[in-house]
Image (spheres, rainbow, N blue to C red):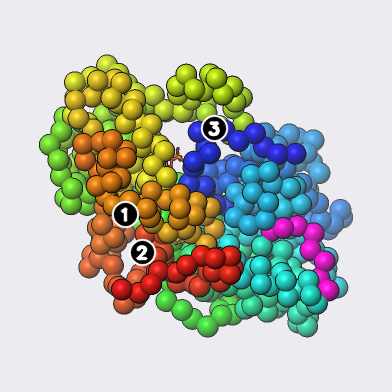
Amino acid sequence: MSLPVHQSDDDKLREECGVFGIIGVQEAANFVALGLHALQHRGQEAAGIVAYDPKQGFASERRFGYVRDNFTSASLMETLPGELAIGHVRYSTAGSKGGTQIRDVQPLFAEFAMGGAAIAHNGNLTNANALREELIGRGSIFQSSSDTECIIHLMARSMQRSIPERMKDALRLVEGAFSIVAMTRSKLIGVRDPLGVRPLMLGRLSDGWVLASETCALDIIGAEFVREIEPGEMVICTPQGVESAFPFPRRQPRFCVFEKIYFSRPDSVIGGQSVYETRRRIGVELAREAPVEADLVCPVPDSGTPAAIGYSQESGIPYAMGIIRNQYVGRTFIEPSEQIRNMGVRLKLNVNRALIAGKRVILVDDSVVRGTTSRKIREMLEDAGAAEVHFRIASPPTMWPCFYGVDTPDRSKLLAANMSDEEMRDYVGVDSLKFVSLDGLYRACEQEGGRNPAQPQFCDACFSGDYPVRPSDGIQRGFKLKVPA
Ligand SMILES: O=P(O)(O)OC[C@H]1O[C@H](OP(=O)(O)OP(=O)(O)O)[C@H](O)[C@@H]1O
Ligand SMILES: NC(=O)CC[C@H](N)C(=O)O
Ligand code: SF4
Ligand SMILES: [Mg+2]
């Protein structure tokens, strides 16, 4: 079975995955369903929950589509009893994409000599292909095409006696990005890769412990935020408490800066800073770096909204909603036929004509990837009679693909990898097009001195080409690293 893919999602910068786990509360799976619902923006392809109950053992449900369409039925949730459960929402970065197979949907489950374990992974392993070949050569039988499965096989080969120790052994051999929530019969386990590329939060709910990709998933169940899992840290949560270990050599953390720009929800808090506030501050930086005279500042909703507010506050130019988003557009929307689409049907965004006519408009969006969205929007504004259109982008030009859990197109399809800023402006067809600088972005992320080129504080490889982990599978498939200047 494959998901119907929405036309306007074809050119999307795909989000990644969300993970959630809870121990020490009754009906744990129901809390997981709520947590996954709050993390739905991180992956809409499929979702899964694994729960453990001492009487019934492990139970697992993995489904295509939204959490709300699957994990709200009482009859399904009754099959997931117990006080310990984990879950995952997926956008694939490895294995079968788009037409995902159910066997690739997480959490993945395996039986070991010392009992069962389930694992949910956000991120992407950069040496998964090489590991898979090696493991298959030594007799492993893979059941999915997901990179995450390598971790299970590496655990199976470990000689350690406990599942957490086997997991440490396995994770010392994988490279790339991983924020993992896993479970055994009695433990909830959380791990972040040594660079801490993807987020992972620890929360507390009555007598239980919660792990979640973002704080918005703690809020939805009324859990209290305790702290972030540190880069390179493994935590083992039981109702008795939380044990912490650092199984990898310490490295300088490199959190994904795109989480702050686009992926995470604006009501989440990362590294002590609200995502909304970071985005608003990017807008402030943008207004300082790229001012222009105009009548209105309008966001491309929803992700451009906080930056547009910041731009308006700093420039003094009034903020207005010049583009309206249809909130009901989702991936399962019935596809209009090709003929109807070609008539210019605007499923997702539409111009607020009465506001735009005759105005000089500054449009603020979070990113330009292939340029498809910006071209469409410029056309709409022109149709609506805008006098001038100025695009301001709350990220630097996206020039490089991501190998750490986001499905970016390859370089041939990234507008900024193939055109100068002026060429992009002409291609999009706007009066001016400006991006925030890398330093401006870092300042907005509370790095007052900007980016430290000797030791960047974040991963920003999709803008800089500076990859903190060698994308070895990608290189083997022909990807060429940036040649140092
Ligand atoms: O240059 P492009 O290839 O068009 O990609 C850039 C656009 O993609 C994302 O929006 P998207 O519509 O995917 O989702 P959103 O509603 O979450 O902003 C992003 O916010 C930009 O608007
Ligand atoms: N985007 C992600 O974090 C995906 C996790 C994992 N690599 C998968 O493909 O399922
Ligand atoms: S390459 Fe970009 S999207 Fe990927 S982890 Fe780094 S900053 Fe994030
Ligand atoms: Mg957008």
Q: Which mark is residue 464?
A: 2
Distance Cα–Cα, label 3 vs label 1: 26 Å
Residue for point 14% across, 40% down: 292
On the image, the x and y values in percent for residue 223 come to 54, 51
Compare marks 2 and 1 and give the one earlier in the sequence: 1
Q: Which residues are magenta?
A: 139-146
The picture quadrant where one finds residue 335 is top right
Instruction: Tell me whether the residue at label 2 lies in contact with that at label 1, contact meaning CB atoms closer than 8 angstroms.
Output: yes
What type is the residue that disc 2 sits on? Ser
Instruction: Say which of 43 and 434 sits in front.
Output: 434
Q: How many marks?
A: 3
Residue for point 52% across, 26% down: 328
On the image, the x and y values in percent for residue 59 come to 81, 51
Q: Which mark is residue 396?
A: 1
What type is the residue that disc 3 sits on? Gln
Q: Which mark is residue 7?
A: 3
